[in-house]
């Protein structure tokens, strides 16, 4: 039977495995512990993860523990969580988000091709814009029983739909290009 969360002998970037109370494990490095708030900052390759002690059923060290006499008092304490300041995550734009918007206005869907994820959305945006423009042109110049005013109205609806899809693709390229960054600092939720 595993004990609850105990981090004595573990320093910064110490590799450990957390056994979660709801099942499963997660491996990462020790980022810091907030004893008062009951939280652990786990450093992962994808980013940082703030884990509440109530979710941790046990801890398995993945390296040799620090030098000490074996007691909790003799082992070095884990590092504090940035002086016990809260951690928040913010989405920050990168060069990919700004360039993605510019490329999306040159050719709809092109802004998604430079992103690291959701590239296939560019083909959806391009096909949505092209099909809307094609239906709008067909409504204007194709054979129909509608009068000129009705043709212009239908074409305007489809051209507007194509423009909305193009603007939506630019917004998607901007949002996809952002990165999630941990922000450490004074109370950010005020």
Image (cartoon, helix red, strand yellow):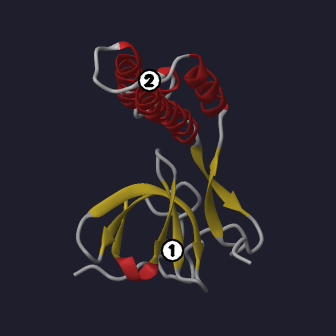
Do tag 2 and tag 1 residues touch (Cβ < 8 Å)?
A: no
Camera-nearest residue between 13 and 81: 81
Q: Is residue 94 left or right of residue 67?
A: right
Along the polypeptide, which appears first: circle 2 or circle 1?
1
Residue 190 falls left or right of residue 43:
right
**Residue at label 2?**
148
Above or below — where is 82 with respect to 142? below
Q: Residue at x 46, y 63 (%)?
A: 65
Q: Which residue is drawn at 46% across and 77% down?
A: 52
Q: In which quarter of the image is the N terminus?
A: bottom left
Q: How crowded is mark 1: few (under 14 residues within 10 Å), some or many (20 or more)?
A: some
Q: Which of 166 and 3 is in front in this view?
A: 166
* Numbered tag placed on residue 8 in the rendering: 1
Front residue (pair 149, 185): 149
Distance Cα–Cα, label 2 vs label 1: 80 Å
Quarter occupied by the C terminus: bottom right
Number of dots carrying numbers? 2
Asked if 190 appears above or below 27 in the picture, the reply is: below
- Vertical position of residue 141 compared to residue 118: above or below: above
* Residue plotted at (44% across, 23% down): 148
Residues 7 and 145: in front is 145
Tell me where residue 129 appears, x and y as whole percent: 42, 25
Residue 90, given in percent of the width and then of the height, sits at 63, 56
The location of residue 97, given as percent across then percent down, is: 61, 33
Q: Position of residue 17 (x, y in %)?
A: 36, 61
Q: Nearer the viewer, mark 2 or mark 1?
A: 2
Q: Which residue: 37% across, 82% down?
A: 4
Classify mark 1: helix, strand or loop. loop
Outermost residue toward the bottom in this view: 36
Q: Under tag 2, what secondary structure?
A: helix
């Amino acid at each position: 039977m595993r004990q609850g969360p105990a981090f004595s002998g573990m320093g910064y970037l110490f590799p450990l495995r957390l056994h979660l109370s709801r099942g499963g494990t997660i491996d990462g490095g020790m980022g810091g512990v907030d004893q008062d708030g009951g939280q652990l900052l786990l450093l992962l390759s994808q980013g940082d993860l703030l884990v509440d002690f109530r979710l941790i059923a046990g801890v398995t060290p993945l390296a040799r523990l620090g030098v000490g006499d074996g007691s909790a008092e003799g082992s070095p304490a884990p590092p504090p969580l940035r002086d016990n300041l809260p951690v928040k995550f913010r989405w920050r734009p990168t060069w990919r988000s700004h360039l993605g918007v510019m490329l999306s206005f040159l050719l709809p869907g092109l802004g998604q091709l430079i992103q690291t994820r959701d590239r296939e959305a560019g083909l959806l945006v391009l096909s949505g814009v092209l099909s809307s423009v094609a239906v709008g042109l067909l409504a204007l110049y194709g054979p129909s029983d509608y009068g000129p005013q009705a043709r212009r109205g239908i074409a305007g609806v489809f051209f507007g739909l194509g423009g909305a899809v193009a603007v939506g693709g630019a917004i998607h390229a901007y949002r996809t290009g952002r990165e999630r960054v941990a922000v450490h600092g004074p109370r950010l939720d005020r």
